[in-house]
Amino acid sequence: MNAEFDGRRGRWIGAPVRRREDPRLVTGRGRFLDDIHLPGLLHAGFVRATVAHGRLREIDLTAVREVEGVVAAYSADDLELGDIVALLERPPEEFTPTTMPILARDKVRFVGEPVAIVVAKDPYAVEDGIEAARVHYDVLDAVVTEEAALAPDAPLVHEEAASNVLLDVTSFDTPGVDEAFEDSDCVIELVTTSARQNALPLETRGAIASWDDRDEQLLVQTCTQVPHQVRTVVARSMRVPEQSVRVTVPDMGGGFGQKCVVGREEVAVAAAAKRLGRPVKWIEDRRDALTAGFLAREQRYRTRAAFTAEGRLIALDADIVCDMGAYSCYPFTVGIEPLMAAAEMPSVYRIPAYRVRARAITSTKAPTAPYRGVSRPQYVMVMERIMDLAGRRLGLDPVEIRRRNLITEFPYHGVNNVTYDPGSYLESLELGEKILRDEGWYELREQAAAEGRHIGIGYSCFSERTGYGSEAFAKRKMSVVPGFDLSEIRMDLTGSVVVTSGTMNHGQSHETTFAQLVAERLGIDIAKVKLRQGDTERIPYGWGTFASRSVTIGGSAVATAATRLGEQLCVIAAHLLGTRVENVELDGDGGVIRLDDPAQRMTFEELADVAYLRSHLLPKETPPTLTATAAFDVPGDGTFSNATHAVVVEADPGTGGVRILRYACVEDCGVVINPQVVDGQARGGIAQGIAGALFEEVGYAENGEPSAASFIDYLVPTAAEIPDISVDHLETPCAFTESGAKGAGEGGTIGAPAAVLNAVNDLLWHTGVQLESTPIHPESVLTALTGADRTEKAGTPV
Amino acid sequence: MSGKHLIVLNVNGEEHELLVEPRWTLLDVLRHQVELTGTHVGCEHGVCGACTILLDEEPARACLMFAVQAEGYAIRTVESLGTPAEPSDLQQEFSARHGLQCGFCTPGFLMLAEGFLAQQPAPSREEIREAVSANLCRCTGYQTIVDAIEATARRRADRPDPEPEAVR
Ligand code: FES
Ligand code: FES
């Protein structure tokens, strides 16, 4: 943090500034991808595999090309594009590289895999064309379950790999694990699973590509969280220099991680547009989005945890299997979920001994990508279940057992070789509990039990590493290492600035919060700040938006650039005011003053006027520009936001349906730049976490058919299922981001499944049944409540 | 597919003569022929509500109807509500209460709310919540959308309502 600005902090930072994105978005004037129309525009769609696993015998597109309105149809052989390759730099016994062709070649590996692209005059003709395609397969056995994938004679999804295990690492095996289990007073053994989920941005994926003869450049407009990475993949696959490809991003209707990887369809559309010399638009329909869009979260944890009689967790031993589907996503690879889980699983607890094996398996299901929270909703669920179960066993209530294990001294260096920066782990738990106690939920739970109602209370505590810097990402050993961001700021003659960021807003209010950061630094009104994102020609370079990195990293780059611009203004002002630069400072109101004579002041407009229009007044060594750039990278292991979620649920004894009666979130993401925005991120994230806990699931039949192809089968919660959520803020400022902010995008999603699952298990406790899988099906709750199947109880016997 | 029909659609009080195929949905025709792109496409099967418009002041899914069926109705889209310089009261409340993040679902929710408030000017919070459950939002968790509609109802009834925290 820059001490120079401390006196004036608070004018913009911390204020619930109204969103600058809203005027266009509430009036239907936003410009989303499908709103863009270009002269001569053609439309594209994909012939997609109808079998989960099969050798491609023949792709016959003759009839497609005869359909009225169809302009072209291409298979992999026609386009000759390079494959998408996402690598980890790990030895062969740990990692097996595989590739993802742009269109399927030789073989299809999931239902919905693109086999050919059809281009036509309108979207209806595209559909006619797709229907006319004849694709013949030699059907192979689908690989749907973990057991099927790991069977010794399993069909290989990628024949170049010796098995369906693409990543197998024992990330940690510290001394003392076995001894701790031998010495322990209580061992919790737990198997948990979570279903495959779709991040489900309301706006589906899409791309519009057009060739510009004047620029000799392919313009790819696409809804992506990572424009520069899309450019890299398109250029590589088409084997052209990066300067021949420009990627821009219009308004974007959500992403949640699904759009932070590069889709093969974007590349195919670019190639088709280049060949046809005409603009081509592809907008994914919902069916394709559900079945063939990137998915996430299908994981199984087999965990053992050792406790002392006093309730101290002394060792953790975990075996994690993540089903990553058919392909490795660029740039994160199949390691995204297992490596995250293995590195971060100890969560907010002090654990002296830790062993973890993590595997990524491949299957004949749609490929996966990061989804808000990445693995953290799952391992937090495991850790929080362990705490509750151990507490029950040892006679400690859920808050007390957590209190005995939470990290309370910072910086804390964990058994996972990660240093945690200061947070409010215990404080957030205590406040969460106080809220429920003060409001009388504990009494209500007792009364309700007497009346035959089923009410349960659940907690989850967690921290989340946000804004991974490149040092943190380097530990993953990805061959491309994200982490830094660049920003450029320019002041014009009116004293207004344009600032760039390599991050990419898709609902997080960057236009507002980044403007607040710049306004605070320069001491100008936010109306004078304009943010530019999502254009590879205008933005120096950027890593986009994921991992809650926008404000921590992008925002720090923006703030640093603003600071440098402020320094330039001071240099010019000092010269014009006839004093040393140490003797001037920004006055917080759009000007620079002399410290020894504050009446001597120059406004930014006056300074810009000299810089641009009368530069002869400046000394030779002072450049007549008001442009500054800055790079920022989070050092070391990065920064950790934290939270406690406290939840009260009721189960319907007739249907087994679970209703949330109270949801309290106590979160700490460091300095809050805009409370409304942070609350919004928390609530939206929690809604997605509740969705994972209670509703959403992409299942697959034995033959690899996905079960959810429309919103009839994929249950997205509505306002009837998501309750009002209170959000309380604690502020532990981050020492190494420019604003003290830590990142707030994912926390809600991380904490919700664990809290909801614990609450449901609390109300089920008296039945002897505990549920350890998400989503929690009403049938399971009902079965437990009605005592059916008592002999085949799931869960851990206590 | 040939055999186009000449139809006249009344959209936001303006008549549009349009040559359409019978299979084109009202949604596609509004977006691409009438060139009002505020109405969004989220699913094309009637669940998400991103395409919600008003047909004779009743909320309706533009994806579930063919353009040729919409002749004779007064159609209203989000573009009829207000402009960036002069947003309607409902639009102002959505902004003031942070009722949107990515904004993709917003036009659908606005039209749903507009139709709902016309029929039920003094709804309870539970009634608003139930009405709003017709549409999907993936970003907000809905609470602030309910807040915005509640605040608009109060404002229209001229009932006192605590302003959202100071905003600039
Ligand atoms: S697009 Fe019409 S309801 Fe989803
Ligand atoms: S604001 Fe993004 S879907 Fe509602």
Image (tube, coloured by chain):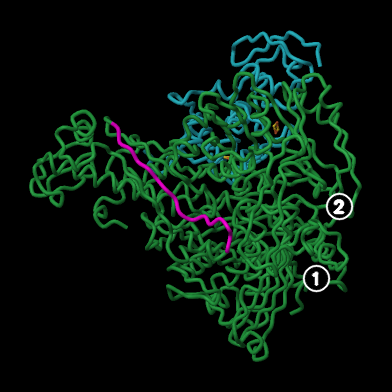
Chain colours: A green, B cyan
Which residue is drawn at the image coordinates 35% and 35% (left, top)?
Answer: A527
Q: Residue A432 at x, y = what percent?
A: 52, 64
Few, some or many residues within 10 Å of mark 1 (<14, 14–19, 20+): some
Few, some or many residues within 10 Å of mark 2 (<14, 14–19, 20+): few
Find out if the beta carbon at label 1 lies less than 8 Å from the nearest ligand 2 atom. no
The earlier-in-sequence mark between 2 and 1 is 2
**Ligand 2 in which quarter:** top right
Q: Quadrant of the N terminus of chain A?
A: bottom left
Toward the viewer: A363 or B140?
A363
Q: Secondary structure at mark 2?
A: loop
Q: Which residue is mark 2?
A: A701
Which residue is drawn at the image coordinates 77% and 61% (left, top)?
Answer: A161
Which residue is drawn at the image coordinates 42% and 68% (left, top)?
Answer: A422
Is residue A450 visible to the viewer in this orientation of the structure?
no
The label nearer to you, 2 versus 1, is 2
Q: Which residue is mark 1?
A: A794
Q: CA distance from mark 2 to mark 1?
A: 23 Å
Which residue is drawn at the image coordinates 46% and 58% (left, top)?
Answer: A669
Q: Secondary structure at mark 1?
A: loop
Q: Residue A738 at x, y = what percent?
A: 36, 55
Toward the viewer: A172 or A138?
A138
Task: Name the subunit of mark 1.
Answer: A
Q: Quadrant of the C terminus of chain A?
A: bottom right
> What's the magenta region?
A477-492
Amino acid type assigned to the residue bearing label 2 in the image: Ala
